Amino acid sequence: MDMPVLREKQLENALLQFIFPFSLVPRSQPAFKRKLREDGYEPFFLDNLDLEGEFYGDFRVSHRNMERYYLPFTNNVLFPHAEDEDAFQRYSRKLNIDGVLRSLHNRTPFRILSADVFLCPFSLGFITVRVQLTNDKLTYTEALEFANRFRVLQDISLPDDLTYVECDGREYKEVEDFIFKVVAASTLPFLDNSDQAGAYFETMPFFVDERMYVQAFYNFPEGTEIDREDLYRAGRIDGLNLSGKPNVSSSNMAYINAYLDKHAYERWAPNTFYVMDENSFCCLTSRSGQMRKLLADQMYGEYYYGLLLNLFHKIVLLKLSNCYSTVRYDRNPDDIEDLIGQITKFSSKYFFLELVTQSQGREIFIQLRKLFGNNSLYEEVKQTLNDLYKYQADTTDRRTSNLIMIFTVYTVISGIYGMNQVIEDLKGPKIDWGVLRSYSLFQYIALVVTITGIATGLVLGCRMTYRRIRIWRRKNRPGSF
């Protein structure tokens, strides 16, 4: 099938949220929270209704609706009543910073409405930058191009090299400079780059490729026909080609339709569509009035948290799988036991098959989970848990057999020979060591076995006590993974 000619379309509004996951320096949460408060970030709790319209420009998020939207056990993780390192801890700051993104073909004004910093379990965090495009004659292609360029933290291609941010009379050659010097400067000292020395963002090489995840709300004028290629471009974030023309990364309409069968949610077609991909989650609508506001509110509220939870699941599952490869190489019993505990904790407390109470939300999140591959990753992690249990059981059996053999030898020799041959000479408050000169070979053997047996028992007891103390410290230290 031939690819239809792209028709440029106007937008009434484009609301974008750029999400960057990062590894948090272990045991740094208390200092991180203090720094966030000093820089104007405030803790986000549902019972503070004053925050419902604080961070979203002209829109508002109902805290009551968010709480009712999710099931109670999900609410405990997403919306804790107090700061809790076993839950999602959100800190938000209203910014209203105006800037311009200059690229090879465009000059796009924007406003940073606010920013969120989430501190999550398993030493994981999220930074969200909330952006509204402020161009009076905004086109759909321009919005896509902005999303495609702004999400790139580090320049990796020629169009990226020619893109920079202007803000407050200063130029920022890379988006990462703008984000971590203007928007979220508090976070930089707490990013864990221990595995990637000299890099800021390559802290999770199994997930991040120096690009942020994009959640977008594209509002077309009422009556605009939203085409199949429009949906495809939203999922792929196709903006402009090198010639400055609207770009679609496929010329095969059959391929586009097959892609949308898997990635689009069309329950409210032809006026509203949702498209989700590994890099983006978008709502495209030509509705107006109260319905437009409701859809935007959901993207800032219920769907935003659902997306974060799915991202959290994927990253933690990948992190657990990555840890397993290290554990298999090292075969450290303490690390194996720690990993078993982390997998068990994640499975029982965070990986929910049911998240929400409403059917449309459930269908969207199930589709997101499938696209992220979370179900297959979870099955792999469960198999990992079985392998770890089996290895631990085999190791424990071998260790127990060896200990039994050792103690049997010591018990027999020291019991038969030690008790009968040398124990009488070792009695009393004062030992006559001169008697050792008259010992026979068997008596010397019995003496050595007796003394080494006592020493071995003391050493094993000390090792067991030390191991128990280490296990207790690992379980009780904050921010451990």
Image: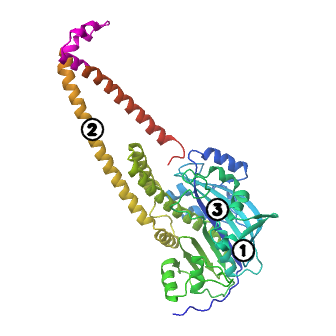
Kindly report which numbered mark, 3 or 1, lies closer to the viewer in this rendering. Answer: 1
* Label 3 vs 2, first from the N-terminus: 3
Q: What's the distance in space between the residues labelled 3 and 2, CA to CA?
A: 51 Å
Prevailing secondary structure class for the magenta stretch in the rendered image: helix
* Label 2 vs 1, first from the N-terminus: 1
Residue 110 place in picture, x, y as percent: 74, 70
Q: What's the distance in space between the residues labelled 2 and 1, CA to CA?
A: 67 Å
Residue 353 in the magenta stretch? The answer is no
265 vs 378: above or below: below
Secondary structure beneath dot 1 equals: loop
Quickly name the residue at label 2.
Answer: 400
Amino acid on which disc 1 is placed: Ser
Q: Which residues are magenta?
A: 421-447
Instruction: Report the disc number at residue 128.
Output: 3
Q: Residues within 10 Å of mark 2 (few under 14, many from 20)?
A: few
Kindly report which numbered mark, 3 or 2, lies closer to the viewer in this rendering. Answer: 2
Q: Quadrant of residue 160?
A: bottom right
Residue at 61% x, 79% y is: 238
Does 133 sit left or right of 152 as displayed?
right
* Label 3 vs 1, first from the N-terminus: 1
CB atoms at circles 3 and 2 under 8 Å apart? Answer: no
Instruction: Report the disc number at residue 103.
Output: 1
Amino acid on which disc 3 is placed: Thr
Kindly report which numbered mark, 2 or 1, lies closer to the viewer in this rendering. Answer: 1
